[in-house]
Image: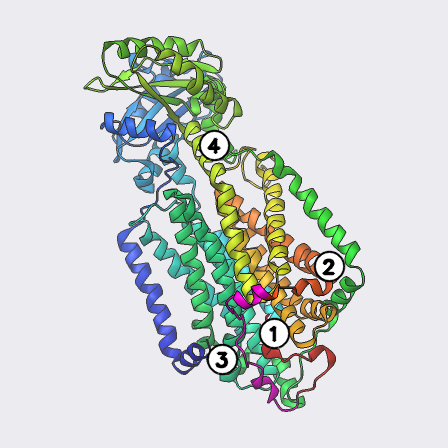
Amino acid sequence: MAAIARWCIAHRLVTVLIWLFALGGTAAAAGFAGSAYTNDYEAPGTESGRAATLLKSGFTNLGGDTDTIVWHTDDSTVRATDVEQKMTRTLHEVERLPGVGAVSGPYNQAGFGQISADGHTAYATLTFDQQADDVPVAQAEAVVQTAKAASGEHLQVELGGSAIALTEAPAIHLSEAIGVVVAAVVLFLAFGSLAASMLPIATALVSVGTAYAGIMLLGHVMTVADFAPMLGMLVGLGVGIDYALFIVTRHRRGLRRGMSVPEAAEHAVATTGRAVVFAGATVCIALLGMLILRLSFLNGVAVAASLTVVLTVAAAVTLLPALLSVIGMRALSGRERRQLAERGPQPDLPTGFAARWSAFVERHPKLLGGIAVLVMVVLAIPTFSLHLGTSDQGNNAKSSTTRQAYDLLASGFGPGVNGPLTIAAQLDGADDRLALDALPATLRATDGVAWAYPATYNSSGDTAFVTVVPDSAPQSQETSALVDRLRTDVLPKAADNTSLETHVGGVTASYDDFAQVVIGKLPLFIGVVIGLGCMLLLMAFRSVGIPLKAALMNVAAVASSFGVIVAIFQWGWGSELLGLGSAGPIEPFLPVIMVSVLFGLSMDYQVFLVGRMYEEWLETGDNRRAVRVGLAETSRVINSAAVIMISVFLAFVLSGDRVIAMFGIALAAAVALDAFVLRTLLVPALMHLLGGANWWLPGWLDRRLPRLSIEPPGCRAPDAKIPGEGVSQDDAVPAAQRVH
């Protein structure tokens, strides 16, 4: 690490140009190639996956994404002459727009059932010539503008569907900008130097920008979800600014202790930079743990987020020291530079609130530990009612056209029309066809079915599908129960004495199947992530207790943050007030992604806090002192880092995307609990109570474990030579051995 830092400092202009070239090159390539994201939740080998495969092979002309245009009037009916003429003319105009394949309205024989029973609501189906992921936003916006032009005082026109939802994405990255501004303010308050506060922002923006463009390119070679770039940016900004914060803090300490600018920058990278690399590695291990699930949808998310973390770590240990050498002594505030010139180098002793709080925890470990446990348990309670399922456009903000179209359809035609099920069938002979022709009547008599349409056959007659409209919403547990009932009871009976093969697909079925696959593999996934994380900590800290406590704390952080998510998004506590739409189920892929990210982020603070305690323990063998000094010296920078991360994560709630808002709130809650409850309360309290047992490791295991040092051996020498340094009890361990 020291050699890397020396090269980057000596060739600072080259280093900066390399990073700028990487950013510009990837951005240009991404702009030229365009995006190729996809949201394919189908899990191979499931019922819904087989239904989708059967339809794709049997029907080659199903077309692109199907959306809806809904209109409603309270004053008359949609059959009134003026309404019919206006909407017929509007539908013809929409059909002539670029990218629109067909529009099927209710004012002809083919539109049977597209006018509500009370005559106040009607809808038309709009088919694009491409799937939603490939529809240009400009084409979708043209459809919305053309259709909405028919709205008037007595006629409401709304649109729904996946392609239409593209028009509701935020046009500018307001959330990222707000998060960065708040982070800059916190950094300035912490450092008192504008130049120093801008460096973490600069390194994070360059690395995250490069990663964002890289993820766009990645979408051309593997399946990458459309929210992966935003997730990568969310995680990258948080960890990137924090990692740079730790290194800049160590650099500033070196300057205050009399080091030259190059020496302080090199020393910061050689010490804290190693901890940053270690912490980043734990985040990547947790993220790449998703690969064991063997779901292409999650593979892209794992690789994309890991790429972002790798680039933020790389920028922190290469670009950052180059920039530190550029700003020189301006890394210190004006007051600090004057004090250094007047008084000379001074030791950095933990003082103020951090020192007082550390001593308070030492005196009351049982009380404070009990309060921390109570907080985590209470917040985790909602997790036990977690319901994974379909989040549809009925969960969008009330002001959105997709939400209003959803509500109009549900009110006029029943909630099931927003998420019909599709029964795909493969036929072999006349008996199969007779059984399928009779199936719609059987389905209409089935509990939970509002309507079933006649079977539609392909040209060769060997594949067909039946569209089933449930009487409950797509995200409802009643619809999930209907899917199970169709698969286990209704369809097997309908296929008796025939070779008819049927599979239930559709939005609800796909999400339910995906959720079952995820839930089935979740124990293995969590076990692998925890196991690998514990192995790293075991090698680094030579202790059995430290990894076990880390695993326990990580599980607590995940459970409590999920409790917050369930309360807000599933129970609807304040979701409408926050502009996040109505209550609904939690996305089935969220647990896996959140477990990966949260385990990685939780490990960061564990490394920086316990690393300092471990150094003090090796130096003195006094557990109480080790915990007290470690907490006092790291709590301020950890709390500053946590405030930055929380601000960045919460800013993403403004993105307008429900999934990204879930990530933002869950990550913010987890970091807040991790930093302010677990690391500053529960961890030090437990370590005080356990005493020397914290550092116990069987001799036979110690001999067999490979050595993994977070800080390089022999790094005390630079500080030992600093002239004028005072040594006190609380400064007994040289600053070079400290992890911040």
Q: CA distance from mark 2 to mark 3?
A: 35 Å
Identify the element where label 2 is drawn: helix
Q: CA distance from mark 1 to mark 4?
A: 48 Å
Badge nearest the viewer, 1 or 4:
1
Q: How is the image coloured?
A: rainbow
The amino acid at mark 1 is Arg
| Disc 2: which residue | 685
Instruction: Place residue 71 in its image quadrant.
Output: top left
Badge nearest the viewer, 2 or 3:
2
Q: Which numbered circle lies on residue 738?
A: 1
Other-residue count near label 3 (Cα within 10 Å), few / some / many at <14 / 14–19 / ≥20: many
Q: Is residue 273 visible?
A: yes
Q: Nearer the viewer, residue 627 or 176?
A: 627
Other-residue count near label 4 (Cα within 10 Å), few / some / many at <14 / 14–19 / ≥20: many
Q: Is residue 669 visible?
A: no
Badge nearest the viewer, 2 or 4:
2
Identify the element where label 4 is drawn: loop
Q: Which numbered circle lies on residue 390?
A: 4
| Disc 3: which residue | 266
Q: Residue 723 lies in magenta, yes or no?
A: yes
The mark that comes first in sequence, 3 or 1, is 3
